[in-house]
Amino acid sequence: MNDRNFLLPAVEEICDYAVEGVYHNGGFEIPNTVVTVGDYAFYKAHNTNFIKFQETSKVTTMGSFAFAYIQNLGTEAPFVLPVSVTTLGEYCFGYCQNLSNFDMSKSSVVSIPAFLFKGSTNLHEVTLPATVKTIEAYAFFECDNFNNIYFLGDTLEKIGTAAFQGCQNLHEIDVPEGVTAIENDTFSGCQNLNVIKLPDSLTTIGDNAFEDCQNIHEMEIPPNVTYMSNTTFNGVDPEKLENVDTSKNAYAQTKVKKALPKKNSKWTIGKLKYKITKAHATKGTVMVVGAKDKKQKTLTIPSTVNINGYAFKVTSIGSKAFYNNKKLKKVTIGSNVTAIGKKAFQNCKKLKTITVKSQKVKSVKSNAFKNIHKKAKIKLPKMSKKKFNKYKKKFMKKGQATTVKITK
């Protein structure tokens, strides 16, 4: 022992508040007899530069605020958790503003408790042991210079609310398989978060989970996600959301609002191709211009379609949209369609059933149904006899055979 390395007595427990507020220009060595480090044991131990554990340490528990507010901790040597440690208390290393290197990789910690490193503004990197199952709320809250976190095992099940909120220099996160939820505010304010890898086990992404994450370069929403908040990406530039891949999750496509599609731009969504006829965040419209391919036997033209997170009304079917689709047998026309273009279904020789949901059709252009099946039925919505007879005329003599029936 030297003046700077103070060896504590050979006891089993360092009691609550035991060394609180002590002034010691150096560090403390914890003997291998100690099993428990109590709450606030080294709280605000001024000028303490390091904590050292003897070989074969038996420490299993470190209490709440045990090493909190030690401003110089870690400036002389990294803090290394012994293998024996299984339990850490809340705020155990909170506000240790010069703690930069922290090694817990060989410990047996099961849970990263709430506020464990809160306000430790110079913490750079942490590797979690293979035993960790949960990261609780606010565990790394406001660790401004936190760069990377690594997971050694695949045991993690939970990342709590705002666990990494305000970690402005966190660059990459690879969430292990087994985690089912990204809770509210988990990565809120992580302005430099570039690469986000999410597991297939994920089902939920909460409120403001990635709020103000302005530098997303790579992210894919897994196929099993069934809930995303409308505020998940609050404050994120829509251009950055172009880097969020929603191709494997149709639900996510309705939640991730990317750049508003431009007028006349063309999009393939599901089995159909669309053209933007009015670009508007809430009042946008599209025209169906064709099928993704001509192998489809059944097609449904929806009332609305989601493009880049915006709902567009499907208001028209373009000229020759399904021209010569020889395998097409059945079509349903959505409730917002107001116009059907020239030759829209011409030469769809197997097309036998056309169900019109819309009561708004104002025009059906010439030869829209030319050379469809001779025994086809065009089924219109139910309405009064007077309205039906008037509506029926819009669909008559559009190139179809006289044997094609128009019913309701």
Image (tube, rainbow, N blue to C red):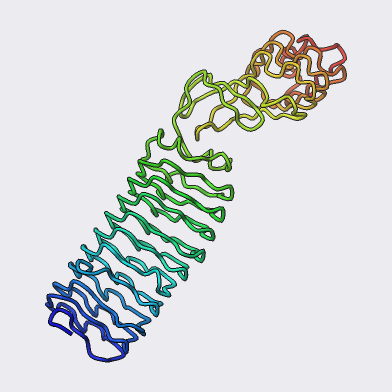
Q: How many marks?
A: 0
Location of residue 112 with respect to 303 vertically, above or below = below
Q: Residue at x 71, y 12 (%)?
A: 343
What is the quadrant of residue 165 in the picture? bottom left
Quarter placement of the N terminus:
bottom left
Percent position of residue 300, x then y: 70, 30
Percent position of residue 286, x then y: 56, 22
Quarter placement of the C terminus:
top right
Percent position of residue 215, x then y: 36, 41
What is the quadrant of residue 91 in the picture? bottom left
Using residue 225 as the reference point, say whether residue 321 is left or right of it. Answer: right
Percent position of residue 15, x then y: 26, 86
Using residue 315 as the reference point, say whether residue 217 is left or right of it. Answer: left
Location of residue 207 with respect to 337 vertically, above or below = below
Q: Residue at x 87, y 20 (%)?
A: 375
